[in-house]
Amino acid sequence: MNPPASTPLIEARQLVKRFGDFTAVGGINIEVRPGESFGFLGPNGAGKSSTMRMIGCVSPPTSGDLNIFGLDATRHGKQIRGRMGVVPQLDQLDEQLTVQDNLIVYGRYFDIPRAECKRRAQELLEFVQLTDRADSKIEPLSGGMKRRVSIARSLINEPDLLLLDEPTTGLDPQARHVLWDRLYRLKQQGVTLVLTTHYMDEAEQLCDRLVVMDGGRIVAEGSPNELIREHSPREVLELRYPAGTNEEHAFEVEGIGHRQEALPDRILIYADDGEVALKEVHARGSIPESVLVRRSSLEDVFLKLTGRSLVD
Amino acid sequence: MSLIDVAPLRIVPPQIRHARRPQRMLERQWMVNRAGGWIIFVTGFFEPLFYLLSIRVGFGALVGDVDDGGTLIPYAEFVAPALMAASAMNGAVYESTMNIFFKMKHEKLYDAVLATPMTSGDVALGEILNATLRGAVYSAAFLVTMGALDMTGSWWSILMLPVAVLIAFSFSAIGMAATTFMRSWADFEYVPAVMLPMFLFSATFYPLSSYGDWAWIVQLSPLYHGVATMRGLNTGDLSWAMLAHVGVLAALAVGGLTFTARRIERLLLP
Ligand SMILES: Nc1ncnc2c1ncn2[C@@H]1O[C@H](COP(=O)(O)OP(=O)(O)OP(=O)(O)O)[C@@H](O)[C@H]1O
Ligand SMILES: [Mg+2]
């Protein structure tokens, strides 16, 4: 049933999504191979969810080609959805049912026999560590628990492809790490993951390859390391000055390093060696309130490509 | 009657013809009701009982016989089938308006369902059947009560049940179609504003002839066609016109269903 490993699991060519006059996705090309984990990174309104919904076959493309599992998404939506799991950006759990029944009824939508649904539901609740909440209603659960129920539910049909739209937004760091661990295990089992995120560390942890989207277009593509190497010098010097004085200080340190970025709360200086850059800042007599030298990250790549901070 | 004759399956759109899993929505409702939702069926049973008792001991004694197109029948027998039609309508409309709105707008239930192999046709047909079921249960309780109070006129009365199911289906379909246009809870004020006059002026409490020149307006009411069919069956006074009434109800059912499936596609699969 699976196409040979060389053919892509998802293949989009010149994919466009318009809502009226507004273009949410403006002609993107992507290829996701089986077993890969692929990320969409981008600020609010970049078109990530719109793209995910087209891949999920719940939103017809305005134009372009979209093939999933080698099938045309516009004509074979039903078959494609049958082999896919979806975790939407906002949880859409069935509030009238218990946690366990949520999983069971979802399995029934895929025509999975009832007894098998029950067996899988138990297994999946164990997988997301919610066995003790199996008979709870949805409402009293915490945000992180609901997210885990959503993920468990998306796995009820043992999907070959899992779509996760901002899987860990709003979770505390510990809950995020638990989820990352679970997603990593799925990847090891051969499930292809496609996710969107605002978090750089998440992208670095989970994605083999990612695209940076902005304004409905892809502005860069590669592995996290490739992107950092290509678009950002090795180190970043972060300078904090008293509130509201960034602009004048930016003038003081002008020309140091390869490139600078003045954010509302700090100035970033991109350089091959952060310490050397810092010495020069001091030599010019500029005295920041605090300094930090760190390795450059995807966030810096993003900043350079879009001129905007990712989390706002 | 011609309506049925010229209604080949092709007028049903592909969304509905290709629906393969509408029963899953019923299965879901069963899982919800298991946990206590069945209480609505109890209230649905008492309502007709009180209605019928009040008519039997009250109006029936006051009003005497009614001239229904030439035949004289006791008032209780005249009005009971109309109330049964109304109870099928009420059960269906309760379920297909507020409840559907909650599931669609607040719970985002259908968004989640449509991410699976389920389709807009499955959701529309399944949820309309679900609301139909509620109307059907109310009507069945009504018919049993009528029988027990000796208000049925003939053996044809048994056929009132399938007609009640059709009425429930038509109103579920119209109700759900209308619900897809509701923007907020405030819009539900329109539901009783439409339902109450329909209940009162569908030849429910007096024969069509007493409306005089305004009878054509009554005939525009979907409920009237249900009432007319039910009444004919209860007295055993059958006519070809009843087939036309059934045809109108069937056309409304198919129309509402089709419309609902299209609306779901537009709203939830943009
Ligand atoms: N159903 C719709 N009708 C009209 N416009 C829409 C619709 N869905 C999305 N949009 C618009 O398309 C653009 C992209 O939205 P999308 O949800 O894809 O962004 P996103 O990258 O997922 O953003 P976020 O990070 O905030 O989730 C936005 O400007 C949004 O307003
Ligand atoms: Mg989004």
Image (tube, grey):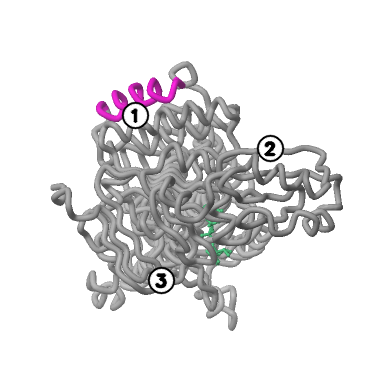
Contact check, label 3 and label 2, Cβ < 8 Å: no
Quadrant housing residue A175: top right
Chain letter for mark 1, please. Answer: A
Residue B250 coordinates in the image, percent (x, y): 35, 66
Q: Quadrant of residue B192?
A: bottom right
Q: Is residue B217 above or below residue A10?
A: below
The structure residue drawn at horizontal position 36% and vertical position 74%, both measured from the top left corner, is A63
Q: Looking at this rendering, what residue extends furthest in the top direction?
A: A132
Q: Earlier in the sequence, mark 3 or mark 2?
A: 3
Q: Amino acid at mark 2?
A: Leu
Q: Chain of mark 2?
A: A
**Magenta stretch?**
A115-130
- Closer mark to the observer between disc 3 and disc 2: 2
Helix, strand or loop for the magenta stretch, by majority: helix
Taking the image as shown, residue B116 lies to the left or right of residue A304, namely left
Q: Is residue A129 magenta?
A: yes
Q: CA distance from mark 3 to mark 2?
A: 40 Å
Give the labeled residue for mark 1: A185
Q: In the image, is B253 to the left or to the right of B95?
A: left
First-in-chain label (1 vs 3): 3
**Labels in figure, total:** 3
Q: CA distance from mark 1 to mark 3?
A: 33 Å
Q: Which residue is identified by label 3?
A: A27
Can the viewer see residue B76 in this picture?
Answer: no
**Residue A247: horizontal and vertical position, in percent?**
81, 58
Q: Is residue B110 left or right of residue A309?
A: left
Which x, y percent locates residue A239? 74, 44
- Residue B45 image offset from top left, x and y in percent: 51, 37
Find disc 2 in the rendering and name its residue: A292
Task: Pick whichever, A128 or A305, lies toward us.
Answer: A305
Q: Is residue A185 visible?
A: yes
